[in-house]
Image: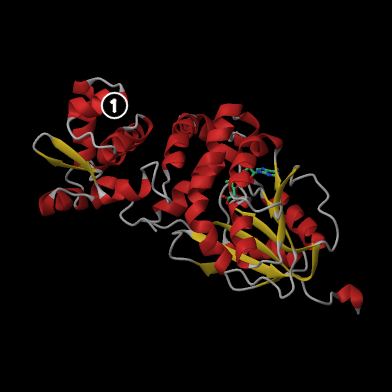
């Protein structure tokens, strides 16, 4: 969890500045907004303009970086110096180098790069500009219905970049039933959660149920995994489609329920329960909402507001997830939280081998 919610408080310039903010002698709201949004935009610009990748290719001085990125040398220097101040670049007289953070998370060549998520953030930035409208009217956006084709493709790339690292970590924690064969990965996008699970369990095959707009781009990503037909897309709508009866051993809903209302999630759990074979599992993996807001819980607090705005929904507590599962006659297990994914929870429920209807 992000503690010390504000960027400035986590990077005070010495004890005096820390104390000034702590004692409310200096206006932290300016740091929390002006500094925070400029910092965010500078990191996004460093990524989208190819600054970090240019440095990785050997450019070291402001003019040579500007030449590679086709940018203005003076403006580039201002951006570079800002990125030094933020800890993203290192600086020795006249020379800039990438920090370890950039090398690991932002370079295109890094296997765990979240660069594509950062690139999608310019779309998210525009959505956030509608926050006041949302709070006034209560009318949120419908991200999936409003993104154009290009933004939808960037969205899918963004999701892929986050899942590359986390999908194997989640797959390792799932109690896949013995003898399991079929998986349904609802809203599975790139399919990497299915890929990771199928690699761990060679008898498994998975269908990735996705909206048509997603499959265009996510299909390319999945093809590159060379799963030989063991993981395939199925175009559809999780809110409407019949998921069948007694078909699947594992149903995944990773990072999906924050797009749906409580009523939609309850109805989905019922259709999932019907679609599961006895002994099968329903996996909800998502950002967790705290039962009550708490100072310092910046990740939980901001993500709930973000999804309220962009999907007219929000994040959900573990209690809500378990309630949907129980209402669908599934047996919830203990929630699992993993170090690789701060704020994320895996809530699994099992379909009993014998239901009360069998008795
Ligand atoms: C936040 S992404 C999560 C992707 C993937 N499960 C992961 O964890 O990386 C949510 C996905 O759900 C898909 N989605 C949203 N509404 C859907 C619906 N009604 N039916 C099927 N898929 C849906 C979106 O297209 C998107 O790819």
Q: Where does the image place residue 297, in percent across and percent down from the top left?
A: 40, 56
| Left or right of 263, for residue 223 | left
* Displayed quadrant of residue 357: bottom right
Q: Give the quarter of the figure containing the N terminus.
A: bottom left
Quarter-wise, where is residue 240 in the image?
top right
Residue 140 drawn above or below residue 22:
above
At 47% across and 29% down in the image, what residue appears?
Answer: 126
Q: Let me know if residue 289 appears in the view.
A: no
State which image quarter holds ligand 1. top right
Residue drawn at (78%, 74%), measured in percent from left and top? Answer: 352
Quarter that holds the C terminus? bottom right
Position in image of residue 160 (x %, y %): 53, 46
Disc tally is 1
Name the foreground residue: 221 vs 85. Answer: 221
In the rendered image, the residue lying farthest to the left is 93
- Residue 19 in view in this figure: yes
Q: Is residue 102 above or below residue 277?
A: above
Left or right of residue 213: residue 295: left
Q: Secondary structure at mark 1?
A: helix
Q: Nearer the viewer, residue 221 or 293?
A: 221
In the depicted structure, whether residue 230 falls above or below residue 29 = below
Tell me residue 241's x, y (percent): 80, 46
Q: Residue at x 35, y 29 (%)?
A: 49
Callout 1 crowding tier (Cα within 10 Å): few <14, some 14–19, many ≥20: some
Please identify the quarter of the rendering in which residue 76 is found. Answer: top left
Location of mark 1 (residue): 68
What x and y, as percent, mark residue 142? Answer: 62, 35
Image check: 355 left or right of 113?
Answer: right
């Amino acid at each position: 969890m992000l503690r010390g919610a504000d960027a400035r408080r986590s990077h005070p310039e010495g004890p005096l500045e820390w104390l000034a903010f702590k004692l409310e002698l200096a206006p932290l709201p300016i740091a929390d907004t002006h500094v925070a949004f400029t910092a965010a935009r500078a990191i996004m610009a460093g990524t989208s303009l190819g600054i970090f990748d240019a440095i990785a290719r050997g450019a070291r001085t402001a003019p040579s970086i500007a030449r590679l990125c086709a940018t203005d040398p003076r403006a580039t220097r201002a951006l570079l110096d800002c990125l030094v101040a933020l800890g993203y670049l290192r600086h020795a007289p006249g020379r800039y180098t990438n920090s370890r953070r950039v090398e690991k998370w932002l370079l295109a060549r890094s296997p765990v790069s979240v660069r594509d998520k950062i690139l999608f953030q310019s779309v998210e930035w525009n959505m956030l500009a509608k926050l006041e409208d949302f709070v006034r009217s209560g009318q949120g956006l419908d991200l999936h219905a409003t993104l154009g084709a290009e933004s939808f493709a960037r969205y899918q790339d963004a999701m892929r970049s986050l899942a590359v690292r986390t999908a194997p970590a989640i797959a390792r924690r799932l109690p896949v039933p013995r003898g399991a064969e079929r998986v349904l990965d609802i809203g599975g996008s790139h399919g990497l959660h299915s890929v990771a699970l199928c690699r761990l369990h060679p008898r498994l095959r998975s269908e990735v149920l996705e909206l048509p707009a997603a499959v265009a781009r996510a299909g390319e990503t999945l093809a590159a995994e060379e799963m030989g037909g063991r993981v395939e897309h199925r175009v559809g709508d999780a809110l409407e489609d019949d998921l069948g009866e007694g078909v699947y051993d594992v149903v995944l809903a990773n990072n999906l329920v924050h797009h749906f209302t409580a009523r939609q999630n309850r109805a989905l759990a019922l259709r999932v329960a019907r679609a599961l074979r006895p002994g099968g599992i329903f996996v909800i993996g998502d950002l967790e909402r705290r039962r009550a807001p708490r100072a310092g819980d910046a990740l939980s607090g901001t993500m709930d507001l973000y999804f309220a705005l962009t999907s007219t929904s929000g994040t959900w507590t573990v209690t809500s997830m378990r309630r949907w599962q129980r209402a669908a006659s599934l047996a919830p297990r203990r929630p699992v939280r993993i170090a690789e994914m701060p704020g994320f929870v895996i809530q699994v429920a099992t379909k009993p081998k014998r239901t009360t209807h069998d008795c």
